Amino acid sequence: MAVTGGRISSRRNNRAKTKLYKVATTWNPDNIFVGRGATKHLSAVATNAAGLQPRNGGFHLDPPIYYPPTLPIQGTFRENGSPSYPFYRPPPPTLVRRIPTGQHAPAFASESAAVAEAEVEPEVDPEPEVTEPVPTVKLSNKIHILGFDPEARFIAHALAGVPNLPPVQMLTHHVVSLKKWGEEGRAITVYDLEKNTISSRSVPCPEYIGRQHRRRWIHPSILDNIIVSTTSGAVLPSLAALRQKIDRRTTICLLQPGLGLMELLNEKIFDDPATRPNYVICHSSHKYTRHSSFKYSLRHLPGKLLLHAVPRGGDADLDQKMSEALGSQHTQHIMKLLSAADDLSAVSLPWHVLLRQKLPDMIFGSLADTISVILGCRYDQIRSSRYTMEFWYGLLHETMHIVASLPELREHPDMLDFFTRESFPKKLKRKLERQGSEYSKWISMVRKGQMPPIQFFNGYFIRRAQELGLDHSQNTLVLNLAKARHAGRLRELQMGLPLGLQPYMMDSDKIGGGQDELDPLLDVEIDP
């Protein structure tokens, strides 16, 4: 009986081992805890663990959500995309955590020991932090320039000299630009201040996108890179007309004299964070003057083009880091294209450094140009009037208090010290004196019925003061007075008084009143 019992015991052990290995050779596709590199034995063990339920639909990898379509997809996919990711290449598979292989049961283990081992949930290594893979963006080198002012023409001329760059396409609001293109040799010619020719480069004929454009503008499908350099009043209607060709793949470079245009565009046109474009804020120190009456010729004093890529915010589809990483590919690309043009001398700067370069001109414009428009006078008439200068100092004191409270500057004391030192107001006063008997360009704009960019000078300081809870009564006052002058001039134009023949404020007022003939200094043609 002992021998027989031994045989029976041995036979039972063999049956237990046979049953165990039968279970271990089964692959269960519903196991969510085992990666592709795990052993079949571990797959079976993890599947039979207590409390686990198989997933419906079997084992699959859930790819991260990237850029969803922002507009209806028409035709073929662009940028090397796919139906799942129409804007970008499909990302690599998401990494899945692994479980270390367990030890096999020994041959002499009993059946109950094998079952107990199978019921024990294996130890899981701490899951490493996995960074979402950033999809590769196929970028376009095609650039469109919205506007036809001297800055826009010079940028088109500079980019025309970059090898292997597609021809830059200018978008204009006036048909006269198209007519003059053929008459002036289909090229932009740049001269120095001594009227010596620097260079002449061919450019494509501008495309007309004004109100008289009846035919639908159908090409291209998406505007990848847009440089905006035009009057402030033309920016919103122009970009609103191109809205269907602008999405999160588009990068817009705002080459404007003030600040606050980006916030206005997001409020009025691109109100959806998931579909709004990427932005680059620019500041140019290049100087230009007219060269006779030619539209495609200008005189140029070299300077620098300062650039700052605005970080993209998160939205419902992407988190902050992924959104910034994808947006950075677009903004860095257009800054690289601009840097390739040696004539532009483009430089990328952090925001507080760009603000240091941009604010002095904004502060001076919010004082001298705004007061000049309100009074319709020359710069030297501001300096010579005691009452006007008292108003100047009151407006300056309020503006400097707002500037000194900006968080961007307070984080960098060296930048803040430039504006708070006693010499800064004296610099503004000396700059006013150097203008002599010149008139502000804003007066020329008002005389033609155009609103000057005061909204992006005094209006910017008002908005920042509201954010910080500061007083802005002086800036609000001059903003309203300038708008009143513009509205009064519009009424004169609608009444058929193009030069303001009826008295308005005072006889020396250059916006309205006592003007019975064209002024060669003020009534020059304003570039759009």
Image (cartoon, rainbow, N blue to C red):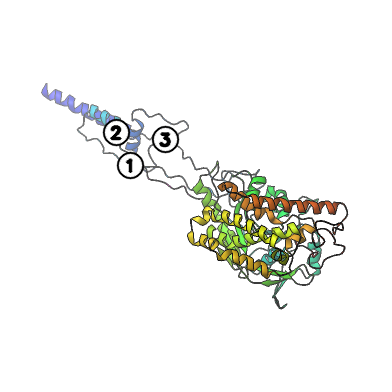
Specify the amino acid type for callout 3: Pro
Q: Is residue 111 left or right of residue 352?
A: left
Residue 339 percent location from the top left of the image: 58, 65
Q: Nearer the viewer, mark 2 or mark 1?
A: 1
* CB under 8 Å between discs 2 and 3: no
- At x 27%, y 28%, the residue is 115
Spatial CA span between label 2 and label 3: 18 Å
Residue 156 percent location from the top left of the image: 68, 65
Check disc 2 and report its element: helix, strand or loop. helix
* CB under 8 Å between discs 3 and 1: no
Residue 514 lies, with reference to residue 61, above or below; the image says below
Q: Nearer the viewer, residue 233 or 212?
A: 233
Residue that mark 3 sits on = 29
Residue interval drawn in magenta: 127-134
Spatial CA span between label 3 and label 1: 21 Å
Residue 342 percent location from the top left of the image: 60, 70
Residue that mark 2 sits on = 21
Confirm whether residue 78 shows in the render. no
Specify the amino acid type for callout 2: Tyr
Q: Is residue 317 left or right of residue 487?
A: left
Q: Is residue 44 magenta?
A: no
Q: Check residue 125 in the rendering and tell me which mark sits there, or answer none.
A: 1
Residue 164 percent location from the top left of the image: 62, 66
Check disc 3 and report its element: helix, strand or loop. loop
Q: Nearer the viewer, residue 4 or 200?
A: 200
Q: Check residue 45 in the rendering and tell me which mark sits there, or answer none.
A: none
**Crowdedness near tag 2: few (<14), some (14–19) or many (≥20) residues, C-alpha within 10 Å:** few
Specify the amino acid type for callout 1: Asp
* First along the sequence among labels 2 and 3: 2
Q: Is residue 131 magenta?
A: yes
- At x 50%, y 50%, the residue is 134
